[in-house]
């Protein structure tokens, strides 16, 4: 059992000439369904049916300027969700920038901690403890 038996079994199943190769390889049965040029690839791939409708160069993008599915870019041109998150969370000028970018939350924490309410309370407790 120095690897010969198990190696032979797994090689016999999964190797290029193995038992499962005609099923799971690129040109095999599942490859014809799920591979790049397979049935699901033709439907869901970049160049597939859904790509033609909601992809970067698809019908929805041509009509609205928004791509619902893209090839993974994370900038504003990264599809509808990318544009929404950039519009909400994006740096300067994002909708939530005033809240998350330090203006509102920074003002609240400064008002509570830096010479504010909580700073006064902690100095009061320091005076009482002495």
Image (cartoon, rainbow, N blue to C red):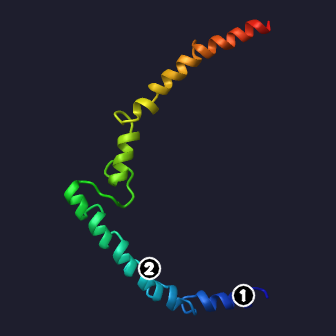
Where is residue 66? Give x, y as percent.
Answer: 27, 54
Which residue corresponds to the image point at 53% horizontal and 19% vertical from the top-left? 110
- Give above or below for 98 relative to 82: above
- Give above or below for 89 relative to 9: above
Q: Taking the image as drawn, is residue 47 in sight?
A: no
**Which quadrant holds the C terminus?**
top right
Task: Compare residues 91 and 123 and report the one nearer the observer.
Answer: 123
Task: Compare residues 14 and 122 and report the one nearer the observer.
Answer: 122
Image-quadrant location for residue 65? bottom left
Q: For this view, does 53 lie left or right of residue 91?
A: left
> Which of pointers 2 and 1 indicates the residue nearer the eye?
2
Q: Which mark is residue 34?
A: 2
Where is residue 94? Give x, y as percent.
Answer: 36, 36
Which residue corresponds to the image point at 53% horizontal and 89% vertical from the top-left? 21
Give the Cα separation between the discs numbered 2 and 1.
29 Å
What residue would you read off at disc 1? 6
Where is residue 18? Give x, y as percent.
Answer: 57, 92
Sooner in the amino-acid sequence: mark 2 or mark 1: 1
Image-quadrant location for residue 34? bottom left
Label 2: which secondary element = helix
Label 1: which secondary element = helix
Where is residue 81? Give x, y as percent.
Answer: 37, 52
**Which quadrant holds the N terminus?**
bottom right
Q: For this view, does 9 lie left or right of residue 64?
A: right
- Give above or below for 112 relative to 94: above
Q: Which mark is residue 24?
A: none
Which residue corresponds to the image point at 50% horizontal and 24% vertical from the top-left? 106
Q: For this view, does 81 lie left or right of residue 130?
A: left
- Give above or below for 96 relative to 62: above
In the orientation shown, which residue stands out farthest toward the left?
A: 63
């Amino acid at each position: 059992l120095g690897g010969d038996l198990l190696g032979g079994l797994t090689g016999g199943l999964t190797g290029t000439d193995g038992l499962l190769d005609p099923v799971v390889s690129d040109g095999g049965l599942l490859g014809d369904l799920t591979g790049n040029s397979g049935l699901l690839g033709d439907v869901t791939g970049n160049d597939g049916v859904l790509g033609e409708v909601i992809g970067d160069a698809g019908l929805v993008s041509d009509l609205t300027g928004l791509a619902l599915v893209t090839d993974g870019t994370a900038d504003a041109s990264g599809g509808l969700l990318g544009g929404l998150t950039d519009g909400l969370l994006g740096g300067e000028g994002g909708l939530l920038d005033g809240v998350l970018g330090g203006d509102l939350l920074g003002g609240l924490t400064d008002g509570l901690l830096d010479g504010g309410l909580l700073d006064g309370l902690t100095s009061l407790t320091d005076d009482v403890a002495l």
